[in-house]
Image (cartoon, rainbow, N blue to C red):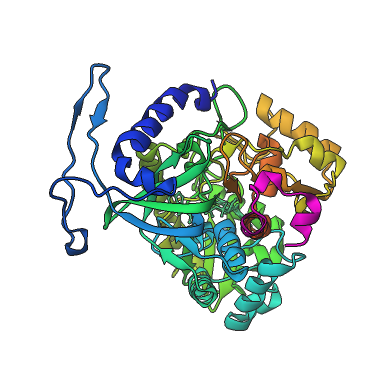
Amino acid sequence: MNPSSRSTSRRRFLTTAATGAVLGPYALALSGQTVAKPAGNFPNFARGEVVRTGGEVGPDGRFVEAARAIPLAGHSQVLVVGAGPAGIGAALAAARAGAKVQVIETAGCLGGVWTAGLLTKIIDGGRKTGIMQEILQAMVARGSDVAKKTKGEIYDPELMKVVLEEMCVTAGMKIQLHTQLVGAVTDKRNRLVAVITESKSGRQAWTADRFIDCSGDGDLAAQAGCKFDVGINAQCECQPMSLMALLTGLDANAIPQYVREVAGEKAKSNMVKLMRDSGIKPSYSAPTLRLLHSGIFSLMTNHEYGVPAYDAAQISEATIRARREVHQIVADLRKLGGPWKDVAVVATAEQIGVREGRRIRGRAQVTVHDIVAGKKHADAVCHVNFGFDVHNVRPGDMFSGLDEIEQEVKKYRALGSKPYDIPLGALIAADVDGLMMAGRCISGDFIAHSSYRVTGNSVPMGEAAGRASVASLRLGKLPHELSAPELKAT
Ligand SMILES: Cc1cc2nc3c(=O)[nH]c(=O)nc-3n(C[C@H](O)[C@H](O)[C@H](O)COP(=O)(O)OP(=O)(O)OC[C@H]3O[C@@H](n4cnc5c(N)ncnc54)[C@H](O)[C@@H]3O)c2cc1C
């Protein structure tokens, strides 16, 4: 069963509660009328006083939170949720186009999977222009020999944090880190008008003229009541998660056959053979060791299967399991001695890498058939060169091709993929107005997602969403009312 239908009634209940009761006095401000001052004694938010939460367990066994006043933290023209590759593109494009931009990010840094996720490789970014190209060049200018040799596509995540902060601060946007989106408010016109966040500052409301969901998992759109798809089948089976790690204590010259940048694809099979011959059984059958610079490597060696991107308890268990596996594998490699005798973990990612979350229903959809046919669009926002990349969704060796999902993927892989366009419509929410998406949560099917999701495409998608949001404001239209020429003119 698709979880969108399962949870619709619950979301509707929460939306009504937030619009009608919690934001009661502020809802007037949203419709342009004078704000009525709430009656009674309210905490002094500036002093860090908090609103005590009331509520009770309802007759159906769920906890019903009582209405309470919360601070209206700010108004922006474009509000971007999530500052991963897509969010960076969106926020920079909107701010540079002159909009007042607010970024809400739950991690303690900008960059999403690039930084908090310790990714280290940008796929399909090399031939892009615009902000993607700018970031690559900035990484080369600030980076290592490897970044220079790979034109920035292999990068150091720590450098990426500071490069992105500099670019975003220079563009003049407001950034609130350590802040998670937890709710969204739509008005009677079905337009998104406010979001609710939680952080050390407590619960806050933020109004904006346009919103862009760059949360990867589609949190904002789901909270706003948009329909979405998850995974490939009725069980919503998804690609696995992986916890990335940085390693030290290795000399690339001593182990060239295992280093992805030296031995190419073969490095993965060499690595898994070494591990298996030594009694190490990684949950990912194509472990990837990359050289970043000066003795620092990245390692992807684990798969966490069957973990929904929207279940915090299961994600927590997967993270702990994955971290234990990564440390154990590195400890076992160290026991091999020789070139491995000093290998050690420098860091594991703060955020487990999520390949798939919700795919929000848009006004258009990217499909596997588009990729096989190399489809072009008049309102193209991104040209994708990368093909299908579906990691196996169930435990087992990659590409063993035995189960029905792998066979489905194999069928399309055999047909081949051609470069194709992502249309603007796939970035515009179908069910709620004033909301766009960018990055891996845009509208597409399971196999298409495996292609367009990579970061070299997420940035241009974000850039297009940021520009389209500002153009729609300037022209007094909603994003879905923009014509292809109007989009091109932005
Ligand atoms: C293990 C792994 C390996 C991969 N390998 C590659 C690779 O080598 N090269 C490549 O280009 N791509 C790779 N990908 C794919 C790529 O990482 C993603 O598809 C890409 O990150 C999509 O970018 P995004 O901005 O949409 O999402 P993300 O990078 O996930 O960014 C989403 C951001 O939103 C924030 N956020 C989420 N929810 C909320 C909320 N409720 N409130 C506030 N903030 C929120 C997150 O903290 C994050 O910063 C890999 C993915 C994984 C998981």
Magenta stretch in the rendered image:
470-490
Query: Is residue 42 one of those drawn in magenta?
Result: no
Q: Nearer the viewer, residue 372 or 227?
A: 227
Q: Is residue 359 left or right of residue 39?
A: right
Residue furthest top as drawn: 59
227 vs 460: above or below: above
Q: Nearer the viewer, residue 417 or 85?
A: 85
- Asked if one can make out residue 472 in the rendered structure from this viewpoint, the answer is yes
Residue furthest bottom as drawn: 141
Image point (86%, 40%), residue name: 373
Q: Nearer the viewer, residue 204 or 178?
A: 204
Query: Is residue 487 one of those drawn in magenta?
Result: yes
Residue furthest front as drawn: 34
Q: Is residue 449 left or right of residue 210?
A: right
Q: Is residue 392 left or right of residue 323?
A: right
- Asked if one can make out residue 345 in the rendered structure from this viewpoint, the answer is no
Q: Which quarter of the figure is the C terminus placed in?
A: bottom right
> What main secondary structure does the magenta stretch of the protein show?
helix
Image point (59%, 63%), residue name: 94
198 vs 97: above or below: above
- In the picture, residue 44 is in which quadrant? bottom left
Residue 343 in percent (x, y) is at 45, 67
Residue 214 in percent (x, y) is at 54, 51
Q: Nearer the viewer, residue 193 or 105?
A: 193
- In the picture, residue 474 is in which quadrant? bottom right
Image point (78%, 59%), residue name: 488
489 vs 254: above or below: above
Q: Which quarter of the figure is the N terminus placed in?
A: top right
Residue 86 in percent (x, y) is at 59, 57
